[in-house]
Image: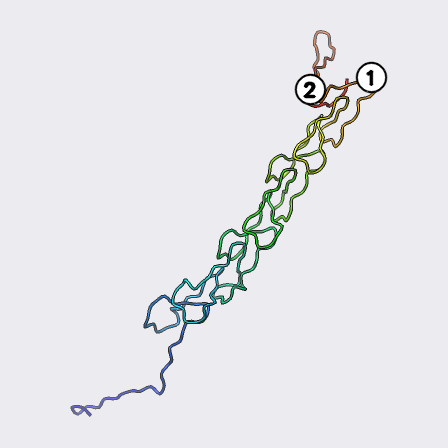
Amino acid sequence: PYNGAQVLIITPSSFNEREACSAGKYSDEGTGQSSDTVCKACGTGTYSDAGAGQGSASVCQSCESGKYSDAGAGQTSASVCKACEAGKYQQATGQASCLVCEAGTYSNETGQSSCAACEGGTAQPFNSSTSCDDCEAGRYQGATGQTSCESCEGGKISASGESSCESCAAGTYSSPNATSCLECEAGKYSGPGAVFFFFFNDLENTEIYSSLFVGSVRCV
C-alpha cells in the first residue's frame, strides 16, 4: 500500500519469445515490431533460401531468364524455377510464365531466353513452334523469320528448302510453282531462260511474240 492505496502489479506467467519471419519472407520495417504482418513474402517468380528472420528484400532471388515459377509467393528453394518448354521463351528474370515463340520463329530446346528466326528456305505460320518447315518444291523463301514461302515464277524451278529459284535452261520451260523444267517439243525452241509475252496486232489480227531472256514459260 502506498498513501493508503493498493497497486496491483500484473506479472505474466510466461513471456512470448521473439518470432522470426518464416523462410521465404522478410521484414524491412525495422526493430520493435509487434505483429507478423510486417513479414512480406518474396513475390511470384522469386524465392529465398536464406532461412528465417531475414530483414531485407535482397534475400529474394529471381528465377533466371529462360525459367519461370508459377508456385506463388513465399517460396524457399530454387527448385521452384522451371525451364520454359520448347516453343516458348522468357528473356526477363523473376517471371511467373513464359512467352510463346511467334510465327516465323522457333525454339527447339527448353530453358531458352529467346527464339530463333526461321532460316532462308524455311517458314513457320504458327506460334509455339519447335521447328520451321522447309519450303515445298516449286516454292522458296530468301528472307529469314518468315511465315510463308513464295512461289517460283514461270520459267524457274526449285527443290524443297530452297532460298531462291533456278532459271530453266535454254531449250526448256516451266509454269509457275514448277519443280522441274520441261523440254521443248520437236520443232519448237526457247532461249536461255526466256519468258514469252504476246500481244495482238489489231490491224492484221495476228499474234506477235517477243522474248525476254529471264525465264521460259513456253516454247515457240
Q: In screen coordinates, is 2 left or right of 53?
A: left
Residue type at numbered disc 1: Gly
| Element type at mark 1 | loop
Q: x, y percentage for residue 111? A: 57, 55
Q: x, y percentage for residue 93? A: 49, 55
Quick one: label 1, few (<14), some, or many (20+) residues within 10 Å?
few
User: Can you say which quadrant of the picture contains the C terminus?
Assistant: top right
Q: For the point 73% across and 27% down, which residue is it?
A: 175
| Element type at mark 2 | loop
Q: Is residue 134 above or below residue 152?
A: below
Q: Which mark is residue 95?
A: none
Report the Cα–Cα distance between label 2 and label 1. 20 Å
Q: x, y percentage for residue 98? A: 55, 54
Q: For the point 41% across and 71% down, which residue is it?
A: 53
Depth order, front residue of 89/193: 193
Q: Which residue is mark 1?
A: 187
Q: Quadrant of residue 19?
A: bottom left
Quick one: label 2, few (<14), some, or many (20+) residues within 10 Å?
some
First-in-chain label (2 vs 1): 1
Q: Is residue 34 above or below residue 45?
A: below
Most extreme residue toward the top, as rendered?
Answer: 203
Q: For the point 46% across and 61% down, which residue is it?
A: 61
Q: Which residue is mark 2?
A: 213
Q: In screen coordinates, is 120 left or right of 174?
A: left
Most extreme residue toward the left, as rendered?
Answer: 3
Q: Quadrant of residue 163?
A: top right
Q: x, y percentage for residue 157? A: 72, 30
Q: For the point 23% across and 89% down, which residue is it?
A: 7
Residue type at numbered disc 2: Phe
